[in-house]
Image: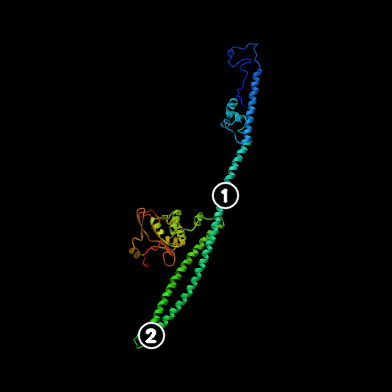
Amino acid sequence: MGKRARKRSGPQDTADGEGPGEATTPVADDEPPADDQAPEPFGPDARLREVSLLVEEVDYVHQLYRWLILTGEVPKAQEWLKKEPWPHPDYVIDVFGSWEKFLAHAGIPGSPLLARLREADAAAKDLAAREKQAAKELARVEDLRRQVETARATRDSVQNERDEHRARAERLQGALTAAEARAAAAEQALHERSVAAAQSADDAPDAALQALGDELAAVRAHREELLSRLEGLEEQARADARTIARLSTLLAAGTAGDAPASAPDEDAGAPATVLQAVERAAADAEHLVFTGAARESAADSPYRRPQDVLDTLRRLDRLASLHADPDGFGRSLAQAATELGLTWRQDVSDLARSRSPHEYTVTHEGSRLDLGPHVALGSGSGAGFIARIYLHVADGSGPVPRGIYVGHVGRHLPDTTT
């Protein structure tokens, strides 16, 4: 291994006793050999060199097989260059002519063992990729399971809240019935007192009649209040019913292991503010366009249920995808909005727009947009319980491309009732 190999000798090599510097007498190619001149057999030194070369070949092949067993890889010439236990690659190349011939002489390119080793490496890599994919799928299943549990808890909470609203509505209905009965009795008594007072000649004011009139006014005011509260509870019950239906659908899809693509984002956590709801909806929206005024109004909104805002904006994005088709989608925008569960208002009154013209316009990318169609959220009174989403619906003939633009999210804009 340590000595430098010599090239294989042949009959044309130097004869016995000739040194490397001694020249031989050349023979002309056209000169016929003498009859008494026969080729000389290999001398002892030539045979010794031939055997030495064969031993070196066997030794190098042996070292090659040893490397394959220890490392499992085909060596490169550079890998034997600086590693002491292995033959120097120059020695190997001197014997075999090149490193590739050395490998071919040892049968490496067609080795079934190396082919199986490569197959085993490929199988190991494939197995590692499958394990990684399985880990991802397992994490996704765990995430879906958490989403299902969250949806189930939210649905139960909403159902309990709906039951409470229903019980309150029933109590208010009973109180309203009693108030109406009292109002009818008070009106009857007032009528009787009025008839009696008309027949009396005494023009002095009847204190009892005045008190009865005051009571009737109070009863009527109480009835109006109860009616308003009852309408608010009914609207809240409808909203809760829509929420329960959405959560039930999500729960069923999650249990079947086929949750929609948007489910992870929807259940990633309810937004804490209306602005967070708008930012999340804007990040997910594919067709709905959000103006800067929408974010400014959302930041000013104290509405207590920002998750409702997020759900409504996502429905509006689906509505915007329908409106994006210039050929139409077979029904009006109001019908499609109602089918999507939106409390759609087609426009604001001309009186409200004339009273507050600046409230119903926004600027988007240098263009002025008029707001009109809007969606109502919540019930009751106060900005913490009700919210509005005002929109600009563009047909493509104006200053902006065709689409639905969100111009205001949050407080109820001034109208004839405010």
Q: Secondary structure at mark 2?
A: helix
Q: Tell me the amino acid under the disc marked 1.
A: Ala
Q: Identify the image quadrant of the C terminus.
A: bottom left
Name the residue located 64 percent from the left edge and 25 percent from the top edge.
54
x 41%, y 79%: residue: 216
Task: Report how far apart the C-alphas of labels 1 and 2 lie in the structure.
Answer: 88 Å
Q: Quadrant of residue 8?
A: top right
Under mark 2, the amino acid is Val
Question: Which image quadrant for residue 352?
Answer: bottom left
Residue 35: quarter of image: top right
For disc 2, the neighbor class at 10 Å (few under 14, some 14 to 19, many from 20) is: few
Would you place residue 101 above or below residue 304 in this image? above
Any part of residue 332 in sight: no
Residue that numbered label 1 is attached to? 135
| Quadrant of the rendering where the N terminus is positioned | top right
Callout 1 secondary element: helix
Q: Give the x, y percent position of residue 94.
A: 58, 25
Residue 81, image x, y percentages: 57, 30
Residue placed under numbered mark 2 in the picture: 195
Q: Kindly report which numbered mark, 1 or 2, lies closer to the viewer in this rendering.
A: 1
Mark found first going from the N terminus, 1 or 2: 1
Q: Residue furthest bottom?
A: 201
Which mark is on residue 343? none
Can see residue 185?
yes
Please name the residue shown 47% across and 75% down the image.
Answer: 175
Instruction: Pick whichever, 343 or 222, lies toward us.
Output: 222
Q: Is residue 89 above or below residue 227?
A: above
Count of residue discs: 2
In-image side of 29 versus 241 (left or right): right
Residue 53 coordinates in the image, percent (x, y):
63, 24
Q: Identify which residue, 22 or 40, lies in the foreground.
A: 22
